Amino acid sequence: MTCLFTKVYGERNTGATYLEKLVNKNFATDLLRGDFGVDRRVMRLVLQQHKPKLRPVENSKLQDQYHERILYSDFGLKHAAPPVDVIRAAAHSDNTLFLLITKHPVFFLSSLHNRPENPLYKEEGLNFDQFLMAEWPVSPRDNVGDKPLESPIELWNVKMREYVRLMKTAENVVHIRYEDLIADFDAQMDRIAEYIPKITAGYGAIRRSVKASDNLRLEDYQRKYKFHKIKADYKKRDLEYIYRKVDGEIMDALDYRKVM
């Protein structure tokens, strides 16, 4: 089936924005909104009414409201846990390709440690082992409830459970591992092309980081995200702790293995 719409879901630092840009560059599709889409100039003016120290929290509240606004039309923000019940009930879900992009939990946790990207998270400066055990605050737009999570590892668990749930619920779902996307770009694009039409015969890659603060090329990411580097780059005790806490069934469902 050729789908009219495409919706990308990916946790923070998993390549979701990169995947969206690849879809826009290579395919003819109506990409459903996934980012906070309010004009930055408008946001600055709105936030000026608050004291500077309160602006991050107010900004977060506005993003929660934006998620609610697009929940039934665009299925919420891309970093959210997929709203499976909403998707199941929506008429246009049958005509939507759902792209789920994930990272191995060790790579994900390392990326999140370097870039928490959570205005409610205040535990800056923790070592990686301390970070793994720290409480993780959530927002309504995360779509995982309103209570803080036990740790960032539990964030991976609860979000990925909803990914697997969506994979079992919707017909038009493609799960892409970030590690595969950067290692074999054409093969992953071919999987997407089974659901939405290509613009040209070949595919156009994006070879530089989509993050303004990174001066990295595709080759840099390819070297960084090889599975054998998990054993080389991380302490054994940290890996043992992660694998004790991570949901093994979800790892299996997403085709990840424990690298020690």
Image: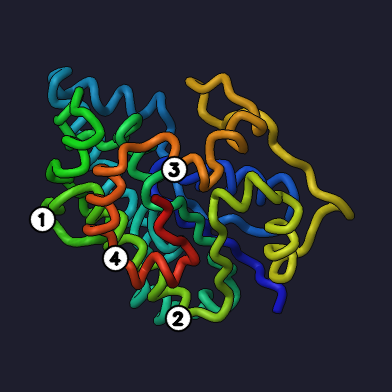
Amino acid type at mark 4? Asp
Quarter the N terminus occupies: bottom right
CA gap, disc 2 to disc 3?
A: 29 Å
Q: Which disc, if any, is residue 119? A: none
The residue labelled by disc 3 is 230
Q: Nearer the viewer, mark 2 or mark 4?
A: 4
Amino acid type at mark 1? Lys
Label 2 crowd (10 A; few <14 / some 14-19 / many >=20): few
Judge whether residue 194 can be spotted in this image.
Answer: yes
Disc on the earlier residue, 2 or 1? 1
Location of residue 109 (image quadrant): top left
Q: Are marks 1 and 3 in contact (CB under 8 Å)?
A: no
Residue 151's place in the image compared with 72, above or below, is above
**Residue 88, image x and y in percent?**
41, 80
Location of residue 145 (image quadrant): bottom left
CA gap, disc 4 to disc 3?
A: 18 Å
Disc on the earlier residue, 1 or 3? 1
Disc on the earlier residue, 2 or 4? 2
Residue 238's place in the image compared with 82, above or below, is above
The residue labelled by disc 1 is 147
Location of residue 173 (image quadrant): bottom right
Q: Which disc, if any, is residue 247? A: 4
The residue labelled by disc 2 is 168
The residue that appears at 43% across and 43% down in the rendered structure is 231
Query: Which residue is at the front of the view, 217 or 172?
Result: 217
Q: Nearer the viewer, mark 1 or mark 4?
A: 4
**Residue 152, image x and y in percent?**
24, 47
Secondary structure at numbered mark 2: helix
